[in-house]
């Protein structure tokens, strides 16, 4: 059987890649993708812990969080579309999307 | 009348069920009648029904559980009442405000009620799953609410910032919860508290705590996770800003109380996770949050931005509870949340009313307001002085309770958090500077015109409600404080 550390390391690496992407990428759609990556890292954690603890709660939590992530991306893409119509840009470090500071 | 005999097992979640029915029928009413005022009337009626049901439950000392998932107790009843007041104020003025959408009123009210429903479920839950889903219901609805101010490019920008930062905070929270689940094998907060007492403090628990505090710290806009709040409150229409600043932030603080307060106070029995380090962490976050909020607020020229920074500072004051961690502090924190709803809500209502009358959001637009709208200027002065903590207004009373909980325990011994109370009092002095500046602009500076301005009657009614509450709670705090004490003693037995 594969030891639990391998799964946790995979999840941690995914989470860190996602976090790095959120902080460095300037395109809002890529940032949303990176957020998905972070959420899926947590989902892997839940499933692994559920499997190793012989407990169903973690899998239930995963289903909930997948549904939440789907809703969040749906709303997020709609908001980005709206922003693109108003400002003609989805670049987060663009002048067009950073009119409010401090 | 015994209300639980009517609704049976579902009594505990009946305020939410009333709102859920509203969420489902309001878009239908909008599509069927095509009249914004009719949609508003139905939405307001649903909110009032829900409010009345909750008041009956709360005053009847009802306690019960539905489906092992949502439990109605003194704490959740009081928090639900708070969210309902916020929802009532926001829905009440939405139809008269020129900023809110006129084409999608059904969506607007449905989203607002869904967001409030999420907050109420959070208040009733004692399990990380329901807390997570409730917080997300609120967050996702509010992303859409902020962006619903169509055709406004600032709202579009605020929506993008809100959704990106909110999504990241969700991911952080979820990762933290997954670590807690792996460590303890359960998601029930009471069981987690019992489990963590027995285990040694290890790196997994540390990661989980950091991720969860950061994730929920975004929701309450604690420094250093606060940068989204001013942008969002400025970009959103004023009723939505009111709803987010007073409601959404209280939900985050409620989550802090329900998760961390319960976990660490129950955990003090054991020395491994006595929580001393965590208490210092919270104390430092609280000190930074109030200081940054107040200092940056001085530099603002937009009044909605200034109020946003001041509400960051107010969240910092309430975070004192997380450092002191006793039931007197918790009851003071809940009471401050209540008074904050009325004073910050009232200030936002006046800003919204003046926007309807054609006065801008800049503080310089308020020059000579005392001549043009004497009542509004006077009410604004009272709300701002209450936020600064001037007696005999509600803000003074609640701040007094809050800071005195940090200064000493009941038996007269000085506690270790005196420095935190000192920082908080210094911050109140700083905050008086920028509040008084607005008052000076309104009363001393000469305006270009002395023409009287007319604001919608609905706004005046809502402002009067807030004004009465601010004065009554200032002179007679027992009205709510008794309930706050019951709630705190339920939370921390």
Image (cartoon, coloured by chain):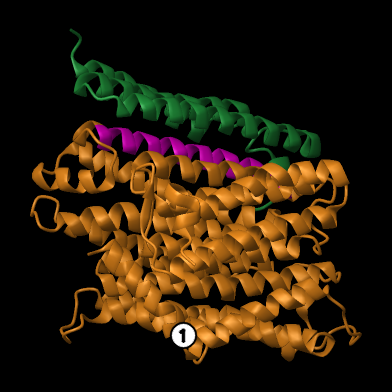
Q: Residue furthest top?
A: A1
Q: Residue at x 63, y 82 (%)?
A: B467
The image quarter in which residue B315 lies: bottom left
Find out whether residue B162 is within the magenta segment: yes
* Residue B199, percent from left and from top: 10, 41
Q: Which residues are magenta?
A: B155-181
Q: Residue at x 38, y 79 (%)?
A: B482
Q: With B131 as the anchor, is B329 left or right in this view?
A: left
* Residue B245, percent from left and from top: 57, 61
Find out whether residue B143 is within the magenta segment: no
* Residue B139, percent from left and from top: 55, 45
Q: Secondary structure at mark 1?
A: helix
Residue B212 vertical position relative to residue B472 in the rendered view, above or below: above
Image quarter of the C terminus of chain A: bottom right
> Closer to the camera, B291 or B253?
B253
Q: Circle 1 marks a residue in which chain?
A: B
Q: Hue of chain B?
A: orange
The secondary structure that most of the magenta stretch takes on is: helix
Question: What chain is the green one?
Answer: A
Q: Is residue B356 visible?
A: yes
Q: With B191 as the anchor, is A41 left or right in this view?
A: right
> Closer to the camera, B41 or B162?
B41
* Residue B422, percent from left and from top: 33, 80
Q: Residue at x 23, y 55 (%)?
A: B278
Name the residue carrying label 1.
B396
Q: Residue at x 20, y 48 (%)?
A: B193
Residue B384 vertical position relative to residue B230 in the rendered view, above or below: below
């Amino acid at each position: 059987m594969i030891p639990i550390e391998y799964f946790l390391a995979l999840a941690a690496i995914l989470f860190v890649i996602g976090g790095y992407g959120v902080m460095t990428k300037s395109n809002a759609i890529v940032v949303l993708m990176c957020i998905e990556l972070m959420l899926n890292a947590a989902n892997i954690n839940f499933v692994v812990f559920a499997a190793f603890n012989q407990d169903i709660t973690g899998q239930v939590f995963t289903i909930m969080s997948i549904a939440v992530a789907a809703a969040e991306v749906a709303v997020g893409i709609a908001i980005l579309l709206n922003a693109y119509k108003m400002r003609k840009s989805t670049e987060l470090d663009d002048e067009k999307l950073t009119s409010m500071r401090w | 009348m015994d209300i639980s005999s009517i609704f049976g097992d579902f009594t505990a979640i009946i305020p939410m069920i009333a709102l859920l029915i509203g969420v489902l029928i309001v878009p239908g009413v909008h599509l069927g009648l095509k009249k914004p005022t009719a949609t508003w009337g139905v939405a307001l009626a649903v909110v009032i029904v829900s409010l009345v049901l909750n008041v009956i439950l709360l005053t009847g000392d009802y306690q019960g559980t539905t489906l092992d998932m949502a439990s109605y107790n003194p704490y959740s009843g009081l928090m639900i009442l708070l969210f309902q007041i916020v929802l009532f104020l926001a829905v009440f003025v939405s139809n008269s405000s020129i900023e809110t959408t006129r084409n999608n009123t059904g969506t607007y009210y449905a989203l607002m009620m869904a967001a409030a429903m999420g907050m109420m479920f959070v208040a009733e839950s004692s399990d990380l799953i329901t807390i997570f889903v409730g917080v997300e219901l609120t967050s996702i609805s509010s992303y859409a609410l902020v962006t619903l101010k169509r055709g406004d490019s600032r709202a579009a920008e605020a929506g993008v910032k809100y959704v990106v930062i909110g999504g990241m905070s969700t991911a952080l929270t979820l990762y933290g919860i997954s670590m807690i689940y792996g460590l303890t094998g359960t998601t029930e907060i009471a069981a987690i508290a019992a489990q963590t007492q027995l285990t040694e403090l290890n790196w997994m628990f540390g990661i989980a705590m950091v991720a969860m505090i950061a994730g929920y710290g975004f929701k309450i806009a604690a420094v250093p996770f606060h940068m989204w709040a001013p942008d969002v409150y400025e970009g959103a229409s004023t009723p939505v800003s009111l709803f987010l600043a007073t409601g959404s932030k209280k939900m985050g603080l409620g989550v802090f109380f329900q998760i961390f307060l319960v976990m660490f106070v129950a955990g003090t029995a054991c020395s491994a996770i006595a929580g001393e380090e965590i208490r210092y962490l919270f104390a430092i976050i609280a000190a930074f949050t109030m200081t940054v909020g107040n200092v940056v607020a001085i530099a603002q020229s937009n009044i909605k931005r200034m109020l946003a920074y001041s509400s960051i500072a107010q969240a910092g004051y309430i975070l004192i509870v997380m450092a002191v961690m006793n039931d007197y502090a918790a009851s003071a924190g809940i009471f401050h949340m209540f008074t904050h709803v009325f004073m910050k809500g009232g200030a936002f209502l006046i800003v919204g009313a003046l926007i309807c009358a054609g006065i801008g959001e800049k503080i310089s637009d308020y020059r000579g307001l005392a001549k043009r709208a004497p009542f509004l200027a006077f009410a604004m002065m009272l709300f701002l002085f209450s936020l600064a903590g001037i007696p005999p207004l509600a803000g003074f009373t609640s701040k007094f309770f809050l800071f005195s909980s940090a200064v000493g325990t009941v038996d007269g011994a000085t506690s270790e958090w005196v420095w935190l109370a000192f920082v908080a009092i210094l911050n109140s002095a700083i905050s008086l500077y920028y509040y008084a500046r607005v008052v000076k602009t309104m009363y001393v500076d000469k305006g270009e015109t002395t023409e009287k301005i007319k604001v919608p009657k609905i706004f005046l009614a809502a402002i009067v409600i807030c004004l009465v509450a601010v004065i009554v709670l200032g002179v007679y705090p027992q009205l709510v404080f008794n309930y706050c004490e019951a709630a705190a003693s339920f939370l921390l037995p």
